[in-house]
């Protein structure tokens, strides 16, 4: 056992029952890994809320977002031969795929980092337009100067890409559109520039040649990205044998940029590991976890909407302590703490 996470005794901090659906036609199916930030002395979470529609007799109903970020419900006759509902997560009608759940991002705040509440002052963030019609997911939050950068997964029939919105007050947002085209996700922008350039980790996917690897890119303006380099690949027989992806923005330490990432096996068991990157050239990997630093061992991590999952894309750093907010079994939001020095020791640093 290599798990070095200290789980909070009040876990789970948030579950589906703790939030209200976005409208009367929806039911919250699960809460997933939040983006994390500090604002006005409070801890903020940008929780991914996955909802499904209330079903009607004889019909299969699925939600989509329209151009204005409002839910529209499509009803399909269960006896229609053009409907394929064999997969509970993705159905097909007349050659077009639809998700049975749809996600948006919900803002919650806390004075103590444990008890979170919504505020009417801060709106939820919904998918808008053609490339977000099936929702937005898994937001990472980075802060440079006075601006928060929100990178998130855009989902639509066109594929899965990375979107960017920015804000300074969490009330108004500037949409920058898709910054990494399909198929791409798990994008985390570094919290500071290097040589006047923005840097980001991201994960393009190549199902036929290559795989689900972590890449690095840089940008002069946070919108146009290039100089792509593959920095971490899957490893046979290890906890990241099938796929891996970045968590939140890397943490700057004296030893290098410390990135906590998720890795999954062929049977979809998700754990967390760490990668240490060079401070001046983060395409250089100094060290990487041979074993996970966190595994799904708690009951709420092993059983849920999709069990055996710990997944993070948000944390706060206080000295040597990482306060990591994470998703457990694709259903709950939880909290664990790590020692940076202890993680570095597992990397031989």
Image (tube, grey):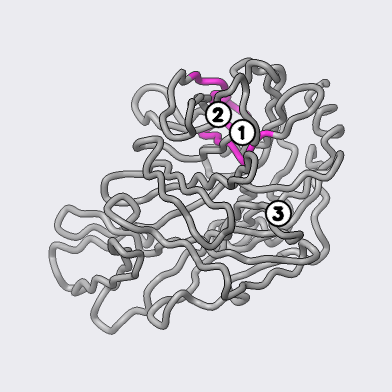
Circle 2 sits on which residue? 198
Q: Secondary structure at mark 2?
A: strand
Mark nearer the N terminus (3 vs 2) = 3
User: Residue at 27% of width from left, 53% of height from top?
Assistant: 130
Q: Main secondary structure of the magenta part?
A: loop
| Total numbered circles | 3
Q: Are marks 1 and 2 in contact (CB under 8 Å)?
A: yes
Indicate the position of residue 331 as horizontal and vertical percent values: 58, 63
Q: Residue at x 51, y 24 (%)?
A: 218
Instruction: Please indicate whether residue 187 sits to the left or right of residue 337 in the image.
Output: left
Q: Nearer the viewer, residue 45 or 11?
A: 45
134 and 269: which one is in front? 134
**Residue stretch rendered in magenta on the structure:** 229-250
Above or below: residue 238 compared with residue 44 = above
Q: What's the distance in space between the residues labelled 1 and 2, CA to CA?
A: 7 Å
Q: How far across and how far down the image is residue 44, in percent?
A: 67, 59
Quadrant, the C terminus: top right
Return the disc, 1 or 2, that comes first in the chain's sequence.
1
| Residue position for label 1 | 190
Q: Is residue 161 above or below residue 26?
A: above
Q: Is residue 304 magenta?
A: no
- Residue drawn at the location 80% of the way across and 46% of the way down: 5
Q: What is the x, y in percent for residue 220?
A: 49, 26
Question: CA gap, disc 3 to disc 2?
Answer: 21 Å
Q: Is residue 48 left or right of residue 336?
A: left
Structural crowding at the residue carrying mark 3, measured as other residues with C-alpha within 10 Å and reported as few (<14), some (14–19) or many (≥20): some
The image quadrant of residue 299 is bottom right
Residue labelled with disc 3:
38
Q: Secondary structure at mark 3?
A: strand
């Amino acid at each position: 056992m290599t798990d070095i996470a200290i789980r909070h005794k009040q876990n789970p901090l948030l579950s589906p029952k703790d939030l209200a659906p976005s409208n009367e036609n929806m039911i919250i199916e699960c809460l997933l890994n939040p983006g994390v930030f500090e604002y006005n002395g409070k801890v903020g979470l940008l929780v991914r809320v996955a909802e499904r529609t209330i079903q009607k007799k004889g019909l299969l109903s699925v939600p989509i977002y329209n151009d204005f970020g409002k839910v529209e419900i499509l009803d399909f006759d269960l006896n229609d031969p053009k409907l394929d509902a064999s997969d509970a997560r993705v159905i097909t009608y007349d050659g077009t795929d639809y998700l049975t759940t749809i996600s948006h991002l919900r803002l919650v705040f806390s004075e103590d980092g444990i008890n979170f509440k919504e505020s009417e002052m801060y709106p939820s963030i919904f998918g808008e337009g053609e490339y977000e019609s099936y929702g937005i997911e898994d937001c990472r939050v980075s802060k440079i100067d006075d601006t928060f950068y929100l990178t998130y997964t855009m989902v639509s029939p066109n594929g899965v890409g990375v979107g960017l919105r920015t804000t300074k007050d969490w009330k108004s947002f500037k949409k920058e559109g898709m910054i990494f085209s399909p198929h791409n996700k798990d994008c985390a922008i570094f919290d500071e520039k290097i040589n006047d350039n923005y840097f980001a980790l991201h994960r393009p996917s190549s199902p036929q040649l290559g795989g689900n690897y972590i890449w690095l890119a840089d940008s002069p303006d946070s919108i146009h990205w290039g100089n792509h380099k593959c920095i971490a690949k899957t490893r046979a027989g290890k906890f990241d044998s099938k796929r891996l992806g970045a968590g939140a923005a890397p943490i700057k330490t004296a030893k290098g940029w410390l990135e906590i990432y998720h890795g999954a096996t062929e049977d979809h068991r998700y754990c967390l590991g760490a990668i240490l990157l060079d401070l001046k050239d983060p395409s250089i990997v100094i060290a990487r976890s041979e074993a996970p630093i966190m595994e799904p061992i708690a009951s709420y991590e092993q059983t849920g909407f999709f069990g055996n999952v710990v997944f993070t894309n948000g944390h706060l750093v206080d000295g040597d302590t990482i306060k990591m907010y994470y998703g457990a079994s694709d259903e709950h939001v939880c909290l664990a703490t790590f020692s940076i020095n202890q993680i570095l020791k597992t990397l031989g640093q």
